[in-house]
Amino acid sequence: MTAGEPAGQKFSASKFVSREYTSMAGGLRIKVNERLWPVASSPDTPLLYVLSNELHLQGPRFGCGLGQCGSCSVLVDGVETRSCVTLVGSLESKSVTTLEGLPAWRIESQGSYQRI
Ligand code: FES
């Protein structure tokens, strides 16, 4: 117990330093569909959440969340990978391709994706 801490309470604010803050300070970036993107989420966030919530890509879909159904599949350095069980922090030097990045898709001038 430290000075000023109520007796019997074991809470210590220093144990709860935000990993999101440290991620932002570290400047995690991932390459998706040939573009480098800054990531605000912590490195232990599943890639699927970053693709959906930060990059607003709709190709990878949430299905089982367990790496079994394949609806969240992307290519990581050309290898099929389940983005729901892949941590974004493990992809810093790799290239991710979603459905939107495949040749049958193109980028509209407004930044949204549309199938040709
Ligand atoms: S959501 Fe089913 S494998 Fe990822």
Image (tube, rainbow, N blue to C red):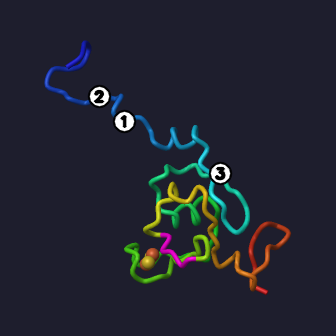
Question: What label sits on residue 80 in the rendered view?
Answer: none
The residue segment tinted magenta is: 79-83
Q: Residues within 10 Å of mark 1 (few under 14, many from 20)?
A: few
**Is residue 90 or residue 98 the one in the foreground?**
90
Q: Residues within 10 Å of mark 3 (few under 14, many from 20)?
A: few
Name the residue rendered at 70%, 69% in the picture: 33
Queried on whether the Cβ of the residue with tag 1 lies below 8 angstroms from ligand 1, the answer reads no
Question: What label sits on residue 16 in the rendered view?
Answer: 1
Q: Residues within 10 Å of mark 2 (few under 14, many from 20)?
A: few
Q: Is residue 31 magenta?
A: no
Measure the C-alpha gap from mark 3 to mark 1.
24 Å
Question: What label sits on residue 12 in the rendered view?
Answer: 2
Of mark 2 and mark 3, the one earlier in the sequence is 2
**Is residue 5 or residue 86 the one in the foreground?**
86
> In the image, what residue type sits under mark 1?
Phe
Name the residue rendered at 57%, 75% in the picture: 74
In the displayed structure image, the side of residue 110 where residue 27 appears, left or right? left
Q: Secondary structure at mark 1?
A: helix
Measure the C-alpha gap from mark 2 to mark 3.
31 Å
Of mark 3 and mark 1, the one earlier in the sequence is 1
Residue labelled with disc 3: 38
> In the image, what residue type sits under mark 2?
Ser
Queried on whether the Cβ of the residue with tag 2 lies below 8 angstroms from ligand 1, the answer reads no
Q: Are marks 1 and 2 in contact (CB under 8 Å)?
A: yes
